[in-house]
Image (cartoon, grey):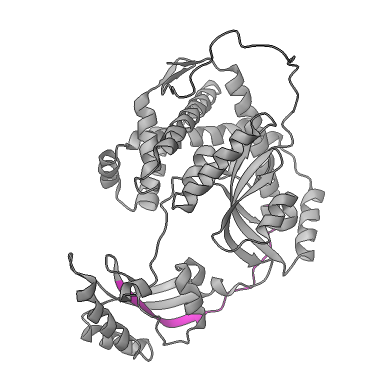
Amino acid sequence: MNIFTRLALLTSASAVLALSPASSQSVADESLPSASLDIPGGGQLLAKPNDPNVRRATAVVNGEIITGTDVDQRLALILIANDGELPPEEVARFRVQILSNLIDEALQIQEATANEIEVSENEVDQYFNRVAEQNFRRPVAETEKYLSSRGSSIATLKRQIKAELAWNRLLGRNVRPFINVSDDEVNAIIERINTTKGTTEYRLGEIYLSSTPENQEQVFANARKILEEIQKGGSFVAYARQFSEASTAAVGGDLGWVRLEQLPSSLATAAGQMSSNEIVAVPAPGGISLLLMIDKRQVATSDPRDATLSLKQIAINFPAGTSEAQAGPIVKRFNEETQKIRGCGTADDIARTLNADVVNRDGIKVRDLPGPLQQIMLDLQIGQSTPPYGSLEDGVRVFVLCGRDAPEITSQESFDEVMSRLEDERINKRARLYLRDLRRDAIIEYN
């Protein structure tokens, strides 16, 4: 095993944009009406069905055209999030789902316009600027060139932003004012939180796919394919945004922090047995859920990983073309010298002997560090350094612990926070009904 194999390597999947807030919703909305169709047996198809292998990539939604280019540019964002690699069958399924999403966006913008709700270009630009920095870590001008080089464009991102801003504003006018949450409901939840102090909360991601007895086998097979692609390194957030039917799709399937008793029994049983970053397929009411364990914590108690750190980073980089054999002795010496550090006061001197870069990092929480470093950092004493961490391509670094402030005891949700959470949950249920009615009344022509 070479020295770089022994080093912990940081890997993270790029995320597709999560532009709007959504509250937890792990099952199909109970408020959605259900009915059975009165279809007699013994009938036959009276016309040839559409060939499922022929996918038409464009549509006209109430007179508004969605082009194949629109689909291609949105698909390019998915490819970026998956490092440019998707199996051909996944690309085909994404194209179908993307077209559905673009149709929903058109309906949302049209409905907002009909209600005299406008989103200015300036608002969209300001939001896009933040997205460019956060998701692509590039200035706006560079982001435009980058997306264009990958087959996408800023226009498709701005369209997505405009739709979500318009939809949220529309819900704020036509739905939120009619949502009522009583003080008794909020107080009951706060009381339950107090009685569960010290129990475990779970931060979960979910991709929910609804099914009926007739299509259950097909939906479950689709879920298995998505699960396999994510386990191979595909972006959970990307799949959630495109395929999940829960309201949390807008934030990449993030359910937030929940307790097991808040989940359907099948999901609760699975979550209680899952480890960090594990993903499983679980039957859920009305369908199936792909459940991702993002994190765990104790209710209303302090978490050591919320400790705030003051660090000194010492890093070396390798010229392009450096082989592992050439870098090995350098990393070995780097490790030996940095382990001699006895306090941050000596770190700069040792860094100079190694011709290494030094950067001070303050206000870093343990939980924000890569997984392999978190427990190491909790075990360090002030003045000690971590083992070397990195790769040949990204460089190797150590972190010297200069200070650690203990975390405060986690405070429970306030009355207003609980009230807001309940309101958001009910707004999202109404939003699904609202969008369902818009789809039902729309005139959609597929070309």
Q: Does residue 37 lie above or below 152 as drawn?
A: above
Taking the spot 39% from the left edge, 47% from the top edge, the residue there is: 81
Which stretch appears magenta? 396-416
Does residue 224 appear left or right of residue 151 in this picture?
right
> Closer to the camera, 433 or 260?
260
Taking the spot 41% from the left edge, 43% from the top edge, the residue there is: 127
| Residue 292 placement: quadrant | bottom right
The answer to if 382 sits in the magenta stretch is: no
Taking the spot 38% from the left edge, 89% from the top edge, the residue there is: 343
Farthest residue toward the front?
Answer: 42
Taking the spot 34% from the left edge, 53% from the top edge, the residue there is: 137
Q: Does residue 18 lie above or below 39 as drawn?
A: below
Does residue 133 appear left or right of residue 443 in this picture?
left
Quadrant in the picture for the C terminus:
top left
Farthest residue toward the top?
Answer: 46
Would residue 214 be visible to someone looking at this image?
yes
Q: How many badges with numbers are in the image?
A: 0
Does residue 334 appear left or right of residue 175 in this picture?
left
> Closer to the camera, 13 or 37?
37
Quadrant in the picture for the N terminus:
bottom left
Where is residue 422 shown, x and y percent of the image? 70, 46
> Closer to the camera, 436 or 271?
271
> Closer to the camera, 187 or 236?
236
Q: Does residue 42 lie above or below 253 as drawn?
A: above
Where is residue 439 shown, x and y percent of the image? 58, 22
Would residue 252 be visible to someone looking at this image?
no
Where is residue 445 shown, x and y percent of the image? 48, 15
